[in-house]
Amino acid sequence: MMSPVPAALVSCGTEDEKNLITVAWTGIINSQPPMTYISVRKSRFSHHIIEKTGEFVINLTTEDLARVTDCCGVKSGRDFDKFKETGLTAGSCEEVGCPLVEEAPVNLECVVKEIKEFPSHDMFIAEIVKVHVSENLFDEDGRIRLDGAGMLAYCHGEYFGLKKHPIGKFGFSVMKPKTRKRLEKQRREKAAAGRHRKTRRGDGRENRSPEKSRKKSKTER
Ligand SMILES: Cc1cc2nc3c(=O)[nH]c(=O)nc-3n(C[C@H](O)[C@H](O)[C@H](O)COP(=O)(O)O)c2cc1C
């Protein structure tokens, strides 16, 4: 009943034995060093791969990736080559040996530090050693803008897009009215500028090349 949660595509394995698993049970657990976890049922094909290699990549998903995300969450890599069948592109990581999903806007390269065993699932606690963010998600000031990326959320058995206008910024509930108005004005101006740019490009798909491999590495260990 924790909701909404992400529907992340986790890639694991090696070039020869690579796999994808959809995971909703994930999150950030520390900032310095950046740490995350995924909880994976012991019976999953991906479980033994991650246990063996001690590495995985969390690939964030968008509305455009909803279908393949669902597919990777219902088919097993034991009898299904998920990269081949979904058409997702396996890209190279910089710090770990497993592939990343090129089509995902954000990829977190992770190295397992600890495996916490629970009756049904094991929690792979990992350090995020590298972050890749698609270039088109950076605004003019170099800030990452995920609000326009159409991020995907999973809510009690259903997928939802987050493309709509955000309700408020972090801390908006305690912001002084004057500051709020100034920020709203800035946001409106930026949105208008963004709309203008998109119209000029004419593809409506937010400055994203089909190869989807132009990534900026944001964080290094
Ligand atoms: C939206 C969604 C979220 C999921 N979250 C998890 C999860 O957090 N942990 C888990 O072990 N399985 C989760 N699953 C199920 C696995 O993704 C699924 O069993 C998958 O087929 C396992 O693939 P594998 O056998 O190739 O590893 C989820 C499935 C979906 C559709």
Image: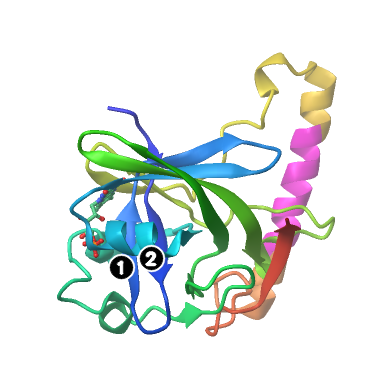
User: In the figure, is residue 176 to the left or right of 153?
Assistant: right
Residue pictured at 43% horizontal, 65% vertical = 53
User: In the figure, is residue 22 to the left or right of 6?
Assistant: left
In the rendering, at what x and y percent does residue 102 appear? Answer: 51, 75
Prevailing secondary structure class for the magenta stretch in the rendered image? helix
The residue to which callout 1 is attached is: 68
Relative to 104, say whether 2 is above or below: above
The residue to which callout 2 is attached is: 65
Disc 1, SS? helix
Whether tag 1 and tag 2 are in contact, CB under 8 A, the answer is yes
> What amino acid is found at the position of numbered circle 2 in the picture?
Leu
Residue pictured at 60% horizontal, 52% vertical = 128
> What amino acid is found at the position of numbered circle 1 in the picture?
Val
In the rendering, at what x and y percent does residue 158 appear? Answer: 25, 45
In the rendering, at what x and y percent does residue 214 appear? Answer: 65, 78
Q: Residues within 10 Å of mark 1 (few under 14, many from 20)?
A: some
- Seen from the viewer's position, the closer of residues 9 and 119 is 119
Disc 2, SS? helix
Residue pictured at 22% horizontal, 56% vertical = 44
Relative to 67, say whether 51 is above or below: above
Measure the C-alpha gap from mark 1 to mark 2. 6 Å
Model colouring: rainbow
Q: Image quarter for residue 135?
A: bottom right
* Residue interval drawn in magenta: 183-195
Residue pictured at 22% horizontal, 49% vertical = 42
In the rendering, at what x and y percent does residue 150 appear? Answer: 49, 56
Q: Residue 14 in magenta?
A: no
Q: Quadrant of the C terminus?
A: bottom right
